[in-house]
Image (cartoon, helix red, strand yellow):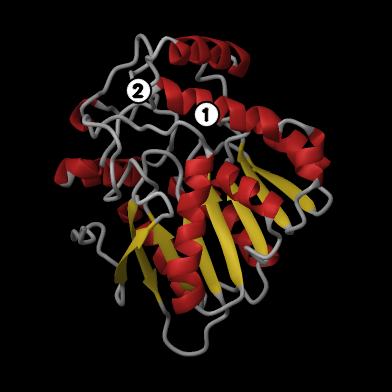
Amino acid sequence: MSLQSSPDNPVPEGAVEQTVTTVDGVKLRAAYWRPPGQRKGTVCLIHGRAEAIEKYYEVVGELLQRGFAVASFDWRGQGASDRRLANPRKGHVDDFSEFERDLEAFMQQVVLPDCPPPYFALAHSTGGLVCLRVARRSRQTFARMVLVSPLLDFGGFAPSRALINFTAGCFSLLGLGDAFPPGSKIAQVEERGFKGNPLTSDPRRFARSIAIGQTRPELMVGPPTISWLHAACRAMNEAADPAFAASIRIPTLMIAAGEDRVVSPLAIERFAREMRIGAQIVIPGARHEILMERDPMRGLFWAAFDEFIPGSEA
């Protein structure tokens, strides 16, 4: 369960690790940090699919420098949290309500008892969609949310959501939900090249992410299973209803990547328009992982974050 540290990616000082147990018995790895001096609240750093706490050390440090406590965790099925299937490389859930249980357990067992209020969400991709689902039911969860490249529809990197939903649903009915989608392939981390990757244009941060998997391969996860894709499609279909966006009562800033091929920037723009207290900006030239992008793009992100989150300053 211990956090991995390396010379190029050291664990920020003061990390406190904790194990969270969800209502359905899944054990999750969590960690939190408290900055010295007066604290401005807590930023809950909520990952996307196939990520782990180690990937966000740089972001944790930047938040600590701003005077925030930081708390984070690994979703079920990835990082150092419990894996459901015999093949640990399969990223699998049957329904996104499982991720909601993870987030709720993290808030109840780590954030509320150990971290100072107010609480802000900084969520990436899949984490952004889960935050919206939880926020729809409870406006008390976060004071504000910053959602980076939230998963509201697939980007040009994948077939249409309707096709994926239909195909995944058919395979799931045949009892193949825990299988990889036809044609998917688990690439070894050393086989993944920087050129043409859809995640970041920053070679140093790309290499840093790959190095985490090379050192701790047990933290990594391969493609999503058919059930994961079907669950994601159902969750995105729900979010596509204009009433869903209108029901969110937490002030929310959505930040889209101009060159995103993993999720749809147009879907993010449409959702933000339908929110009552939401706003959206686009980082030109950025790929899907804005927080892992080159410094000029990250600078635009942090300027927007500092303007939106009360008490934040570089």
| Amino acid type of the residue tagged 1 in the rendering | Ala
Q: Residue most toward the bottom?
A: 37
Per the model, the C-alpha gap separating discs 1 and 2 is 12 Å
Q: Residue most toward the front?
A: 24
Label of residue 231 in the image = 1
Label of residue 290 in the image = none
Q: Is residue 27 visible?
A: yes
Choose between 186 and 13: the one closer to the eye: 186
Taking the image as shown, residue 139 lies to the left or right of residue 40, namely right
Q: Is residue 304 visible?
A: no
Q: Quadrant of the C terminus?
A: bottom right
Instruction: Reply above or below: 150 against 10.
Output: above
Choose between 248 and 300: the one closer to the eye: 248
Q: Residue 63 placed where, x, y %?
A: 48, 68
| Amino acid type of the residue tagged 2 in the rendering | Asp
Q: Residue 234 placed where, x, y %?
A: 60, 27
Q: Residue 174 placed where, x, y %?
A: 42, 9
Tell me which residue sits at (20%, 61%) in the image. Answer: 2
Q: Residue 61 placed where, x, y %?
A: 40, 68
Q: Quadrant of the N terminus?
A: bottom left
Q: Callout 1: helix, strand or loop?
A: helix
Instruction: Reply above or below: 265 against 59.
Output: above
Label of residue 178 in the image = 2
Q: Residues within 10 Å of mark 1 (few under 14, many from 20)?
A: many
User: What is the total number of numbered labels drawn onto the structure image?
Assistant: 2
